[in-house]
Image (cartoon, rainbow, N blue to C red):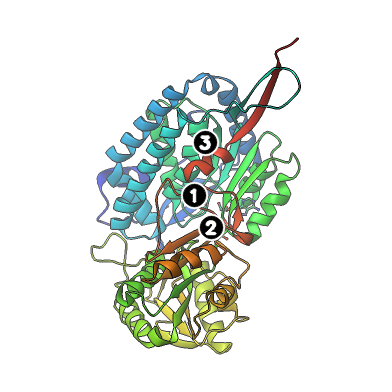
Amino acid sequence: MTTRFHPGLGEAAQGFLSRQHQLLIGGRMVESDSGRRTDILDPATGDVIATAAEASASDVDRAVEAARRAFEGPWSKTTPSERTRMMLRFATLIEANADELAELECINSGKPLVFCRNGDVVGIAEMLRYMAGWTTKMGGQTPDVSLPGEWHAYTLREPVGVVGQIIPWNFPLNMAMWKIAPALATGCTVVLKPSEQTPLTALRLGELALEAGIPPGVLNIVTGFGDPVGAAIAAHPGVDKVAFTGSGVTGRRIVQAASGNLKRVSLELGGKSPVIVFPDANLEAAAAGVCSSIFFHAGQICAAGSRLYVHERAYDQVLDAIARRANSIKLGHGMESGTEMGPVISRRQLERVTGYIRRGQEEGATLFAGGGPVGERGFFVRPTVLTDVKPGMAVHDEEIFGPVLCAMSFNDNDLDRISTTANDTTYGLAASVWTSNVGVAHKMARRLQAGIVNVNALSSPDAALPYGGYKQSGWGRERGYDAIEMYTEVKAVAINLNV
Ligand code: ADP
């Protein structure tokens, strides 16, 4: 195999890429049963940068057994404060290896290095520290009961058990940590399956977890394809909960597979999030926010603001500002300084996104900015703005997961009607409102059917804020205390004191 690395990569990242990557099971790196390997690409060049082990269902069996042993063995005997200390050490090790992790994330996901370093790596250390705080604080309650006689009743919050976690390719580090951190905090053990396209940083996290003293078998990492690896995790009778982030189609498959043992299921399935700009908003800030929301990481964000509604009075000004910004975004390799937007993840994704742009135009939308692929190498798509978009068009109704903004205007002051239009989607992940009227902001926040509403902001990536969707955007919430609840069972204990 010939691998080609970007020359800007540091020694640590190059050393990691050159390794023969295996599966992490029971605290050891082991070969997959099949011995097969998958090429891992740099999406900015299409070059192979590493290969990863391709697991099969029997490897999942081994990982689930290791996770069960760790759950019933050393991990369940740790005190909450011991788990906190291990998680804090894990966070410190992440920071100590920040450059390597950021470079690996950049080279494999395509996201500019500066975002990987200052956003993703910083964010996952924060997530660990936030969840490590809950470990010593989450306990049960002592409700007063009204049963006849005298009773002492209380609740216990217990770990749900062995958790299967299946994550996508857009934010490999963040998606892994959003799932690993609450599992560790609550005393669960994990079988994590990263995307077959971006397994590298998860493997490195697994090593750092061991170095931090987290016992073998608590965090197992099985690389490979959705079918068979993800499917085996979702169906496995030894897995107590499955947490998934990805497409709705795969989410539905996971729900079906999970029904065998009725394992707990949480799903984060993307969106078609509205951005509503009122004429009293700071319009320059709104235009900048809209662009960041849809063009950051080439639109490969579940919560991307992909449907824009601007009041008629502000429409021309906002759209011109957006087009100016879209046309000036610097595309390039994430390792090059000055790069503002990288590629999409794969040729398949490039074709999917450009297919939507074509279909949008065929269905009557106007190409206002961008459009189509760029360059000979890698998987780059121009930041694109479509106007004259209407409900019923594929670009309006479906998640594109690329840098494609669908812009529409409204001429209405009735917040009920505006929110009805914004809510006209099967999704309900995020929404963003731009206004200087605090009453409008709060009223819209109540009317919008979305798990996250940002006002005068494009996103709010804080570990304390729950993240998840209404409607077909998923089940459950990650981040915040809600994530702790998702990884625990509540047990009611009632003691009759008169016997
Ligand atoms: P995409 O098609 O964009 O890769 P998916 O939702 O299919 O999005 O992928 C998200 C994650 O789900 C990946 O880790 C993928 O391997 C996994 N996956 C795909 N198919 C299945 C499946 N049938 N069961 C479980 N996991 C799957």
Vertical comparison of 342 with 412: above or below: above
Residue 468: x, y in percent? 54, 54
The quadrant of the rendering that contains the C terminus is top right
- Residue 25 locus on image (x, y percent): 53, 32
Say what secondary structure mark 2 lies in: loop
Q: Distance from label 3 to label 2 (Cα)?
A: 22 Å
Q: Residue at x 45, y 49 (%)?
A: 465
Q: Distance between the residues labelled 2 and 1?
A: 8 Å
Residue at the image position 38 percent from the left and 26 percent from the top: 85
Q: Give the residue number, with chain letter if any, for mark 3.
A: 183
**Sequence-earlier tag: 1 or 3:** 3
Residue in the foreground of this view, choosing between 314 and 273: 314
| Left or right position of 459 against 231 | left
Q: Which of marks 2 and 1 is nearer the N terminus?
A: 2
**Reading the chain from its start, which is encountered first: label 3 or label 2?**
3
Which is in the foreground here, disc 3 or disc 2? Answer: 2
**Mark drawn on residue 451:** 2
Could one spot residue 404 in this view of the protein?
Answer: yes
Q: How busy is the neighbourhood of tag 1: few (under 14 within 10 Å), some, or many (20 plus)?
A: some
Kindly identify the amino acid type of the residue bearing the numbered disc 2: Gly
Which residue occupies the foreground of this view, 488 or 168? Answer: 488
Please give left or right for residue 422 compared with residue 316 in the image: right
**Is 448 placed above or below 383 here?**
above
Name the residue carrying label 1.
466
- In the rendered structure, which amino acid carries the disc numbered 3? Ala
Q: Is disc 2 in contact with disc 1, using a CB cutoff of under 8 Å?
A: yes
Left or right, 246 with respect to 308, comes to right
Of 478 and 373, which appears nearest the observer? 478
Quadrant of ligand 1 in image: bottom right
